[in-house]
Image (cartoon, rainbow, N blue to C red):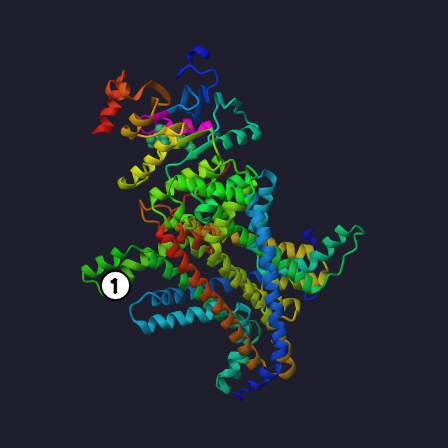
């Protein structure tokens, strides 16, 4: 079925090389985008919980804007709109960045900052889930706000949200495919290109699907390992790492025990 | 086999026959060889230390737990794996739980009307009429349109009793109906059950309320480690139990 | 920096409006189909029906692991073929991008809704099932009148949040060249060379709708939090 992937393309490569190059862009976007998202997300998430009303409002504004505009629209804003809004010289300079990079960077900012808004909400939930006593104990010790967050609150909150961050990792690598709309030849785009060139749609999409599945598996396993590695000895195991959509269910109802009818 | 049954008052047609019942959870014997007969109109109080299998026994009677061997006959129907038999028995057996288990999304009235309509096929007006009557009986009819979360524990448990009664059961099973309640609410629920007993309802009640047992029980059955250790009329049992295990148990609950 | 001229947006409004209606109807249809199938999928897994639950589990895992755009491409390619087989003569049936979008979103969202409902089912207190058994309610009545209503209630904030994400995701039908809100804007933007105004306007529309919906969900959450506290 996949033999077509070994055939020669018009440009002298094999189709599989297209896929590999697509995978490369996908991974690069997901990896670097993740670190942007994580850094910004933690800062904004903290901002959501600080005393200062101005920073709180700012963080909230960030989250609302980036979470409530479709990622595809955000992609267009970064790619088409931003250069027009900047001073002409700067905009022209951006527009002249050569092909893969000219689409890669907008896609990178877009995915990073979009995912950051989602991570910020997780961080906030993690911080709010900590017992109030932690705050007070730190204050009683005379620790400053910065030290409290840096050494008391964050280390605990981040550990707590590792399982729900799994779904954000999965989210960002899946969203990399949106970059094809501005012309970045990532994995899905390459699969479609192969399908168009060879009419072997099953093979092309099938191969891409398998790669995405493998990535999902790796991401999931990696997050499980991290969860295990950072768990505080003696603490209860984290919530099942199976996605933020329902982590929220569990956060809200920690009480009712699971029910298996037939087990 | 038959002679091993511990028999209550002589009754050719007992309401419940439990014979050589065995229930295992994995390799653990929660009930080993339990036999018990409940006559029509008889009131039995089941007691015993925690984990002795009291809940398991009464849960087996309406097949909420599936027994591993032995026989259960309720009102002449033998409990087999057939869903027909199970449902027939369940609709004759009312059950009240320690934790009430009211349906939180339904009003008090709807809690009481659901099963009569869906299981007995009653039309809505009749189900409504019956529910109102029984809610009045447990003295909670003025709360009929509230939701369970808006009631106190004692009120919730009385609704649970009314809900079970709406199926017009021939026997009622109570699993520690008052042990999840604040002390001041225990009385109102016990009074309701006493009234029910005075109406002649057959019942098996797991409880450690000795005053209640003295007042209504025809027989006290004491269980330990998954079997029936001793039984007798309440005044004798509470005053002078025969077995050491029962003595130890009574000492513990009195102090 | 060119001067911005948002009057173009006002002129284009009827066209954008029809695009928005398409986005909303796609959302509504996918919500209905997705919730129906998702509930079915969740029940299949809850009852642990042997082969079927394994199949459903794999389907859900697959849908949750690959990008929606790839799913759209798959369905765009597969649906005509599958329908051809179903109709008997084996020839692909051209169904068009619109129907493909409806089918894809319904089936795709079913995977996400089913996970929410599956977890909701697990969270129902065991005593609820026992009370139903004690009342001799049939399995059907138990789920129809007691269990599922509670699950939908508890999970409603999450179901709605997922639906807001669904609404945003419908913009991806852009890759099928459909005329949803974004598609309409993009077509006009290219026609008039007014990308900046169009895309900004579209972003604002999405922002307003999603924000309003999130606000509604948040108020719902608060309401349930209070109701829960009283228990
Ligand atoms: N679902 C189950 N799985 C495994 N073991 C169980 C289960 N249910 C009950 N058991 C065990 O069976 C034994 C009897 O339990 P049961 O609930 O009948 O005790 P009980 O007499 O009602 O105690 P209590 O007074 O605490 O309610 C206990 O040791 C319990 O741990
Ligand atoms: Mg018990």
Left or right relative to B202: residue C32: right
Which residue is nearer to you in this view: B185 or A13? Answer: B185
Q: Count the marks: how many? A: 1
Residue A111: x %, y % from top left: 49, 67
Q: Is residue C220 visible?
A: yes
Q: Residue at x 54, y 54 (%)?
A: C112
Where on the picture, by quarter, is residue A73?
A: bottom right
Q: Nearer the viewer, residue C148 or C63?
A: C148
According to the picture, the residue beneath numbered tag 1 turns out to be: A147
Secondary structure under tag 1 reads helix
Q: In the figure, B189 relative to B89: above or below? A: below
Depth order, front residue of C42/A118? C42
* Residue C126 sits inside the magenta stretch: no
Mark 1 surroundings: few (<14), some (14-19) or many (≥20) residues within 10 A: few
Q: Quadrant of ligand 2?
A: top left
Residue B237 in picture, x, y percent from top left: 28, 20
Question: Is residue B70 shown above or below A137?
Answer: above
Residue located 25% across and 24% down the image = B250
- Can you tell me whether the CB of the residue at mark 1 lies under 8 Å from the nearest atom of ligand 1? no
Residue at position x 48%, y 22% from top?
B72
Considering every residue shown, the one lying at the far top of the view is B3
Q: State the residue lying farthest toward the bottom.
A: C3
Q: Do we see residue A97 in this rendering?
A: no
Q: Is residue B60 magenta?
A: yes
Q: Residue furthest right?
A: C89
Q: Is residue A163 left or right of residue A18?
A: left
| Residue A230 drawn at (x, y percent) | 35, 51
Q: State which chain disc 1 sits on.
A: A
Range shown magenta: B44-61
Residue C52: give x, y in percent of width and height. 61, 42
């Amino acid at each position: 079925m996949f033999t077509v992937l070994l055939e020669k393309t018009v440009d002298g490569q094999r189709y599989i090389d297209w896929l590999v190059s697509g995978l490369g862009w996908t991974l690069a976007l997901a990896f670097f985008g993740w670190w942007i998202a994580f850094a910004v997300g933690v800062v904004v998430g903290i901002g959501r919980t600080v005393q200062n009303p101005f920073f709180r409002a700012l963080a909230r504004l960030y989250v609302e804007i980036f979470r409530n505009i479709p990622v595809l629209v955000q992609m267009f804003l970064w790619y088409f709109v931003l250069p027009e809004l900047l001073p002409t010289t700067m905009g022209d300079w951006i527009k002249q960045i050569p092909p893969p990079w000219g689409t890669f960077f907008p896609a990178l900012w877009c995915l990073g900052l979009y995912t950051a808004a989602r991570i910020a909400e997780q961080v906030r939930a993690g911080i709010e889930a900590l017992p109030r006593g932690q705050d007070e104990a730190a204050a009683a010790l005379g620790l400053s706000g910065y030290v409290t967050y840096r050494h008391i609150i964050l280390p605990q909150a981040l550990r707590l949200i590792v399982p729900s961050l799994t779904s954000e990792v999965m989210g960002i690598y899946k969203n990399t495919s949106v970059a094809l709309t501005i012309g970045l030849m990532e994995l899905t785009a390459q699969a479609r290109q192969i399908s168009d060139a060879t009419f072997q749609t099953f093979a092309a999409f099938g191969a891409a699907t398998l790669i995405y599945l493998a990535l999902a598996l790796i991401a999931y396993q990696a997050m499980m390992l991290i969860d295990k590695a950072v768990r505080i000895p003696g603490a209860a195991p984290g919530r099942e790492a199976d996605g933020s959509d329902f982590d929220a269910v569990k956060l809200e109802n920690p009480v009712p025990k699971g029910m298996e009818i037939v087990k | 086999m038959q002679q091993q049954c511990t028999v209550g008052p002589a009754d050719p047609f007992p309401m419940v026959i439990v014979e050589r019942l065995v229930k295992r959870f994995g390799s653990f014997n929660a009930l080993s060889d339990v036999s018990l007969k409940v006559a029509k109109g008889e009131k039995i109080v089941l007691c015993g230390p925690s984990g002795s299998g009291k809940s398991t026994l009464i849960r087996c009677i309406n097949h909420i737990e599936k027994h591993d061997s032995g026989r259960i006959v309720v009102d002449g129907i033998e409990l087999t794996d057939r869903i027909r038999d199970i449902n027939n028995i369940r609709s004759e057996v009312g059950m009240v739980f320690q934790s009430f288990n009211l349906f939180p999304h339904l009003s008090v009235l709807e809690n009481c009307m659901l099963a009569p309509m869906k299981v007995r096929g009653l039309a809505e007006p009749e189900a409504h009429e019956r529910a109102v009557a029984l809610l009045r009986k447990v003295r909670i009819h003025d709360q009929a349109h509230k939701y369970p979360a808006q009631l106190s524990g004692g009120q919730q448990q009385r609704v649970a009793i009314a809900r079970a009664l709406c199926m017009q059961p021939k026997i009622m099973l109570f699993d520690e109906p008052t042990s999840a309640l604040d002390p001041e609410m225990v009385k109102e629920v016990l009074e309701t059950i006493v009234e029910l007993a005075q109406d002649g309802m057959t019942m098996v009640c797991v409880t450690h309320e000795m005053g209640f047992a003295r007042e209504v029980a025809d027989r006290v059955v004491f269980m330990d480690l998954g079997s029936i250790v001793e039984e007798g009329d309440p005044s004798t049992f509470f005053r002078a139990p025969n077995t050491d295990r029962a003595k130890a148990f009574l000492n513990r609950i009195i102090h | 920096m060119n001067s911005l001229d948002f009057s173009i947006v006002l002129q284009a409004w009827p066209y954008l409006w029809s695009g928005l209606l398409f986005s909303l109807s796609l959302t509504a249809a996918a919500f209905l189909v997705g919730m129906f199938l998702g509930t079915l999928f969740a029940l299949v897994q809850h009852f642990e029906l042997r082969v079927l639950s394994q199949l459903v589990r794999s389907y859900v895992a697959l849908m949750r692991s690959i990008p929606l755009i790839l799913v759209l491409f798959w369905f765009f390619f597969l649906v005509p073929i599958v329908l051809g087989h179903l109709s008997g003569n084996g020839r692909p049936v051209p169904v068009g991008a619109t129907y493909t979008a409806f089918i894809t979103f319904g089936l795709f969202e079913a995977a996400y809704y089913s996970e929410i409902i599956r977890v909701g089912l697990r969270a129902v207190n065991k005593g609820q099932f026992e009370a139903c058994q004690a009342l001799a309610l049939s399995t059907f009545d138990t789920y129809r009148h007691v269990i599922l209503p509670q699950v939908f209630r508890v999970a409603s904030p999450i179901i709605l949040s997922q639906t807001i994400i669904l609404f945003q995701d419908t913009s991806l039908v852009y890759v099928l060249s459909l005329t949803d809100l974004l598609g309409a804007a993009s077509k006009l933007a290219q026609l008039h060379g007014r990308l900046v105004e169009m895309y900004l306007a579209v972003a604002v529309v999405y922002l307003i709708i999603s924000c309003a919906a999130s606000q509604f969900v948040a108020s719902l959450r608060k309401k349930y939090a209070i109701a829960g506290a009283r228990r």
